Image: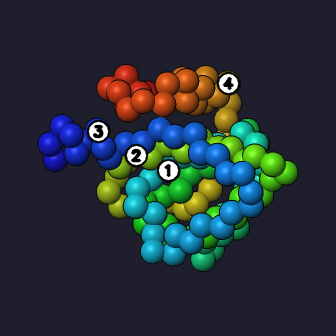
């Protein structure tokens, strides 16, 4: 993988929807994702997990996960999405779609990740 491919493998986004939305990812997630809802409600459904997310809740989507996502809100729906290709193990079969607890340190780290949504070496390092 060259340097350009490496940087393009990561993504730091704040997504906004102005109305309810359904995304079909039954083809499988192209990468690992961390998501955190700011405004609205979300339901993510895989073959074995139904995850309900409210504002402030962090969730993980493993690479290859086949799922549907449903986004609802009165007015704007906003959430952060962080895409990353690397994982401690290439064997991701043991990881499921799930909520992740956010303690004080995790909240601080996630705030730092979303403070600057550019893909930089500093953001990748976080």
- How many residues crowd around disc 1 within 10 Å: few (fewer than 14), some, or many (20 or more)? many
What SS does tag 4 mark?
Answer: helix
* Earlier residue among tags 4 and 1: 1
Instruction: State the residue at coordinates (35%, 27%).
Output: 120
Q: Residue at x 37, y 22 (%)?
A: 122
Q: Residues within 10 Å of mark 3 (few under 14, many from 20)?
A: some
Numbered disc 3: secondary structure: helix
Question: Does dot 1 land on a helix, a strand or a loop?
Answer: strand
Q: CA distance from mark 2 to mark 3?
A: 10 Å
Left or right, residue 125 beside residue 5: right
Can residue 81 be seen here?
yes
Q: Tell me how far mark 4 sits from mark 2, CA to CA.
A: 23 Å
Q: Nearer the viewer, mark 4 or mark 1?
A: 1
User: On the picture, is 83 further left or further right than 85?
Assistant: right
Q: Cα distance, mark 4 to mark 1?
A: 21 Å
- Is mark 2 in CB contact (under 8 Å) with mark 3? no
Q: Which mark is residue 7?
A: 3
Residue position marked by numbered label 4 in the rendering = 104
N-terminal of the two: label 2 or label 3?
A: 3
Closer to the eye: label 4 or 3: 3
């Amino acid at each position: 993988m060259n340097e350009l491919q490496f940087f393009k493998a990561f993504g730091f986004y704040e997504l906004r929807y102005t109305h309810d939305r359904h995304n079909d990812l039954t083809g499988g997630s192209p990468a690992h994702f961390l998501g955190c809802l700011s405004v609205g409600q979300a339901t993510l459904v895989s073959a074995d997990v139904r995850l309900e997310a409210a504002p402030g809740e962090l969730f993980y989507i493993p690479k290859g996960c086949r799922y549907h996502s449903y986004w609802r809100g009165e007015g704007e729906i906003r959430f952060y999405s962080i895409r990353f290709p690397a994982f401690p193990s290439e064997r991701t079969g043991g990881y499921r779609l799930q909520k992740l607890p956010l303690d004080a340190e995790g909240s601080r780290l996630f705030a730092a990740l979303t403070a600057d949504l550019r893909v930089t070496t500093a953001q990748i390092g976080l």
